[in-house]
Amino acid sequence: MKINNVGSMGVNPYKKNIEKSSAATSKPHSKADKVEISSKAIDLQQSNEVLKARQEKVQALKTQVDSGTYTIDPKAIAKGLLNFYKK
């Protein structure tokens, strides 16, 4: 019995698949991530009062730690943990 290639002479179906996949990977991706910050967030970041108060508090804590006078209140920590987990 002889089987002849009828209709699809010299066509490789896998070759089309390879060509499609290589064409898809060679295209540059035009989509990119974009981040937008709202005007309110920018205002909050630029608030000098908050920054000054935070810097003063951090500096005070640094001096206490450096001098060895910083103490931890275990009752205040436990109270804060309980309040956090009760919510």
Image (cartoon, grey):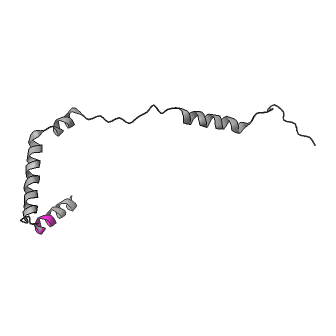
Q: Who is closer to the viewer here, 6 or 59? A: 59
| Viewport quadrant of the N terminus | top right
Q: Who is closer to the viewer here, 1 or 27? A: 27
Report how many numbered discs are placed on residues in the image: 0
| Viewport quadrant of the C terminus | bottom left
Horizontal placement of 79 versus 13: left or right?
left
Q: Identify whether 85 is placed above or below 45.
A: below
The stretch in magenta equals 74-78
The picture places residue 78, in percent across and down from the top left corner, at: 15, 66
Q: What residue is at 10 percent from the left and 67 percent from the top?
A: 73
Q: Who is closer to the viewer here, 53 or 41? A: 53
Where residue 68 sits, quadrant-wise, is: bottom left
Q: Identify whether 72 is placed above or below 58.
A: below
Q: What residue is at 55 percent from the left and 36 percent from the top?
A: 25
Horizontal placement of 35 versus 24: left or right?
left
User: Magenta span: helix, strand or loop, mainly?
Assistant: helix
The picture places residue 6, in percent across and down from the top left corner, at: 84, 33
The picture places residue 49, in percent across and down from the top left corner, at: 8, 41
What is the residue that sits farthest to the bottom in this orientation?
A: 74
The picture places residue 62, in percent across and down from the top left corner, at: 11, 57
Horizontal placement of 49 versus 11: left or right?
left
What is the residue that sits farthest to the right in this orientation?
A: 1
Horizontal placement of 44 versus 21: left or right?
left
Q: What residue is at 22 percent from the left and 61 percent from the top?
A: 85
Q: What residue is at 45 percent from the left and 31 percent from the top?
A: 30
